[in-house]
Image: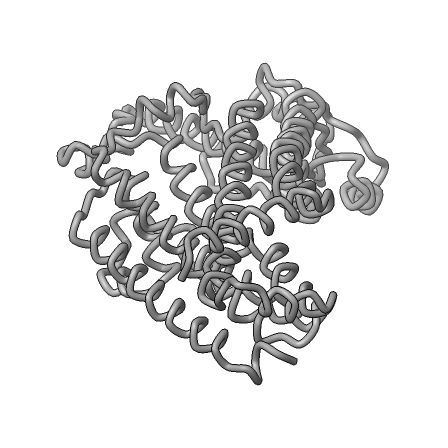
Amino acid sequence: MNFKHIWIVFTKELKDSFRDRKSVLSNILLPLILIPVMYYCMNLFMKSTTDEVENNMKIAISTNESIEVAKEFTKQNVIGEDKIQIIEFSSNEEAKNALNVGDINCILVYSDGFFENIEKGIISKIEIEYNSLKSASEMGAQVLNSKLMVLNQSLATQKLISMQISPEILNLVSISQIDTSKELGNDNNSSSQMLMMIIPMYLVIVIVTAGVPLAIDVLAGERERNTFEALLSTKANRLSILLGKYLAILVFSIIAIVMSFIGLILGIVLNPEMFSTGEEVMTLATIFESMNVPVGALILALLCAITLAVVFAGIQIAISTWAKTVKEAQTYLSYMSFPAMIIGLSTMFMGAGDMQGFMAYIPIFNTVASLKMVLGGVINYSFLITSVIVNIIFIVIVIFFIIRMFNNEKIVIK
């Protein structure tokens, strides 16, 4: 092994990768632009749907009794001060057709004898008809449902007062929620919870796939261009060539990961409303304020992510070396995103405290779990250290395997 030869191969491959405009655009610049644009479009759609429900919600009323009585009751007891229009139709079928095409959001259906039963204090029924294929309709149904819950509580209170019974009888049990994680110093708000869902899954998928384009080009591509045999005939030995290409793929992967992560942060900064819950707006300031992560734990989590990148850079080299053509390498390497996506999605809604000890011994799982735990304020140093050690062991195994592949003439020379 010659460090000078490693450096020559490394710089040559890295320069070639940055000369390839398609590679730079798709793996470095595109995530920086595409992720904020994607979040902007999603946020725009969500805002338009919310604005439609808040400012332009339309409902119809279905009743076998006086429509005027039903309208007046709905305006006073359901709509209140909100901007909800009542649209009249000549028949129930016409109202349902309008609901299906999206001209109205919902239909309030009052049962027979509803208003007379309400006066007598008899249980009455209201149905909300909506179209689940229309997001504005589904959101409108949620709005109406919450308003009818308030109406139900109000009518029950009035009935009890008329019977000279205290309305407090409806709340004989006082219910409160206490988050015991805060007693342990884990004061996490919804902003960090949102990050805990998004970042581990997203980062792991990028780690697993970032170096694929360069891995295809530096081995399968070079073999297809008939330049690989010429490189093997130079003074540089095979180990130096292998390490030079390995480092090039790893550095390119890390750059792509960093740019993708910056794109994710930009998406959060430019579209804070999308990640907000209630009155809390998700900004970088609120994120950092909510995170109280020890430096040691953060470094271990980052080491876990970096070592995973090293593992998959080696796997990408092995697959590209095995493949006979660029097309074959592309086919094999395209499947690499599946394990990351499956593991990422399966753990997306798991909390930091849901991570199991066995996950520390499985690559990808250990990185997702480590990032979730650190972002969630659950600091388990034994888990983090085990995850890093396991990834390092896999690095050794992968390097040993690809060195054997490189020394096998039948695999290298095809």
Horizontal side of residue 392 vs 248, given as left or right: left
- Looking at the image, can residue 97 be seen? yes
Give the residue at x 53% y 57%: 245
Give the residue at x 52% y 23%: 269
Q: Which of the 4 image quarters holds residue 61?
A: top right
Give the residue at x 46% y 46%: 203
Q: Nearer the viewer, residue 70 or 173?
A: 173
As drawn, the residue found furthest toward the bottom would be: 410
Residue 291, image x and y in percent? 29, 29
Horizontal side of residue 227 vs 314, given as left or right: right
Q: Disc count in the image?
A: 0
Q: Nearer the viewer, residue 378 or 149?
A: 378
Q: Which of the 4 image quarters holds residue 330?
A: bottom right
- Looking at the image, can residue 112 be seen? no
As drawn, the residue found furthest toward the front would be: 235
Specify the quadrant that holds the N terminus. bottom left
Q: Nearer the viewer, residue 72 or 357?
A: 357
Residue 411, image x and y in percent? 56, 80
In this picture, is 233 found above or below 84? below
Query: What colour scheme has been applied to the protein in the rendered image?
Result: one colour
Residue 231, image x and y in percent? 61, 64
Horizontal side of residue 369 vs 219, given as left or right: left
In this picture, is 264 found above or below 333? above
As drawn, the residue found furthest toward the top would be: 81
Specify the quadrant that holds the C terminus. bottom right
Residue 261, image x and y in percent? 50, 37
Q: Which of the 4 image quarters holds residue 177?
A: top left
Give the residue at x 73% y 46%: 22
